[in-house]
Image (cartoon, rainbow, N blue to C red):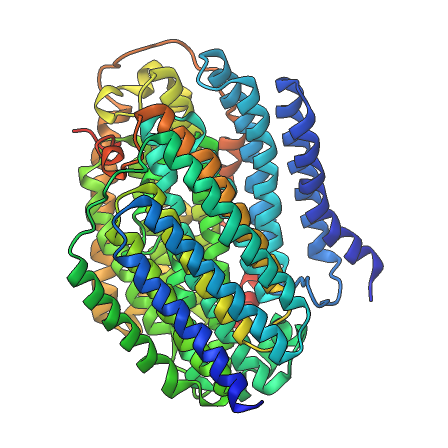
Amino acid sequence: MTPIALDVAHLFAGGLVLASFMLLYQDRMTGLINTFALHALVVSLSVAWQAYIQQAPHLYITAAIALVVKALVIPFALHRIIVRLGIHRTIEPVVGTGQTMLAGIGLVALSIMVMLPITPQAGTLAREDLAFALSVILLGLLMMISRRNAVSQVIGFMSIENGLILAATGAKGMPLVVEISVAFSILIALIVIGIFLFRIRERFETVDIHVLHEHRGEQP
Amino acid sequence: MSEPGEFVVAAVLVIPALSAALLALLPDDRTSAWLNAVASFLTFLCALVLLAQRPSPGPFLIVDDLNVVFIVLSTFVGFTTSVFSATYIAHELEIGRLTHAYLRFYHAMYQVLMFGMNLALLSNNVGLMWVAVELATLTTVLMVGIYRTPAALEAAWKYFLLGSVGIALALFGTILVYLAARAVVGEGLDAMAWSVLVERAAEFDSALLNLSFVFLLLGYGTKVGLVPLHAWLPDAHAEGPTPISAVLSGLLLNVALFAVLRFKIVMSANPGALAPGPLMVALGLLSVLFASFMLYRRQDIKRMFAYSSIEHMGIVTFAFGMGGALANFAGLLHMTLHSLTKSAIFFCVGHIAQVKGTQRMADIRGLTVSHPVLGWGLVVGVVAIAGIPPMGIFMTEFLIVTSTFARQPVLAVLLGLSLLVALGALLARLNGLAFGDPHGSREPAKASFVPVAIHFALVLAAGIWLPATFVAWFQHVAALLR
């Protein structure tokens, strides 16, 4: 593998981590959805590059699915949904941008410290890819716990899926799982968007999860 | 290669898949409920055949001594639950809690869930198993939210979020396992096949395996409901339809635990890898301690038994973590008996909540007077689940505590103590529920008692007399678990 090929792979993987950081501080719904589209675009470029350097044509399919579904269809649908729900202008208070970013940096450091020493035999490419992928996954988790809006949580979850795709394509020659996991991520996204948001809307006229928490089952 | 065996394995998967498609198309509710039960029964029969006819492992599917126990248990409880579900659902339709369209969806999803669980148990490929567990999770999420009340939606949402985070961590762990195997086995399907992984585990890079096990334990552990990853479990049990609570507690938790066990076997086959036992012991003990104290403050009857499920999954995880022939044997038996008992309890609780029109325990009193069969069924169930002799769970809990006492006395004391705490909580609640002056509706219940009776009879039989062949079978499986 030529050094330039590795560098480009790292560029895309690093770009994905950067996009995850950008997701963390978006306080407007439209901005958040657009940033997620960027996130998905980077992951699809990264997968396409892996397909090229690994000479694994089936990965192009994964890249295309990521591009079409996650970078175009889902963001488009989410835009429609937030307009219909009337939350497109809402400024969502992101709890302590500074602290969240610091925590995010800590998580990236953690994943590099965990992954790099123990995966020397996995190959250079897989090793750094895994460190980046773990960062993206942890940042996605951070986003899910620091947001209270259902749409933001779904976006956090889909960014975790992107991290998983990065990891799975970095593991050279991994059979069948890439395709299936992509299909499943689409399914999840559809189910979530279709059913939960509309049901939540139907019942409460809001998608703020905090309102849901008032309906806890455990009444004294 | 034995042809009939392969045919039967295919049948265990194809019957649920086909009937799911059929049930999605059938408009008539009575036929659907009946067909659901018949399909589940046929699947159970096929699973029984697998005991005798076993095909050689292929790249995707495998039947071995370990998973056959889970498959038979899972299809059996799946069948009895479908019988219970028929009467339960008829009542829900009568009072208008479910519409016809939702019912059709419910029956189709029930079979998809069965398909997902059977596939997870039968798969020889770690990736395929992950997909199957995810499928099972998604179907249960949809079913938990089926009543569309605010509480049900919140429960489904919470379950969806926590479940998918868990499943994401598990996929990352699976990728790491593949990387560890690829260096030894080479690229391709073999590096994800169970049979190959276990055989060659000794040569894998142990650091990579360690890391993967942490992710897998946290990931699938979320689905087992281990503390501190349990937050979805009580809500999902309390707010969904009761047949789903029974299937969740009785089967889906086991399937997730089965995934952990598979990876535990790989870990213990590698001499350089971290011992998986202590991690499982710690999480298991934490779950038992936490859940047994949480039992005291519950107001909702289904929620209380959900916490009891956390407690029992904790006990089973603890036993498998301790390892050794005796603890593994007891853990396996405990898991089986817990599935049978807990699903039977949910059958009773489902009918009780229907006749009383509430799940609040304060509003349910004197069941043995107003509804003798249901009330005494609940009494038997609680006696069994609390671990009072002569029921089988007493014996398995006794075995787990004593075998631990010989090796780690402090842990055994802690475990024994929390079992007593849980016993106290359950009996205190039972006293209010079952005895005293009856409260609320006295209308006779239209209930299916046969599944309940069969389950309790099996649990009682296990406590009094276990057939020698059965013991030998479980001992053999326990030896496989190391």
Residue found 29% across the figure and 48% down from its top = B231
Residue A122 higher or lower than B154, as above or below: below
Q: Is residue A22 left or right of residue B447?
A: left
Q: Residue at x 42, y 30 (%)?
A: A198
Q: Quadrant of the N terminus of chain B?
A: bottom right
User: What residue do we see at 39% from left, 38% from top?
Assistant: B156
Observer-nearest of B412 and B122: B122
Q: Is residue A42 left or right of residue B411?
A: right
- Residue A202, given in percent of the width and then of the height, sits at 38, 24
- How far across and how far down the image is residue B218, in percent? 37, 63
Give residue B300's position: percent from left, percent from top.
27, 31
Residue depicted at x 41% and y 51% = B163
Q: Quadrant of residue B109?
A: top right
The answer to which image quadrant residue B151 occupies is top left
Note whether residue B33 is visible: yes
B112 on left or right of B303: right
Is residue A45 shown above or below A115? above
**Image height of B103 relative to B186, above or below:** above
Give x and y (percent) for residue A168.
53, 69
Task: State whether residue B401 appears in this view.
Answer: no
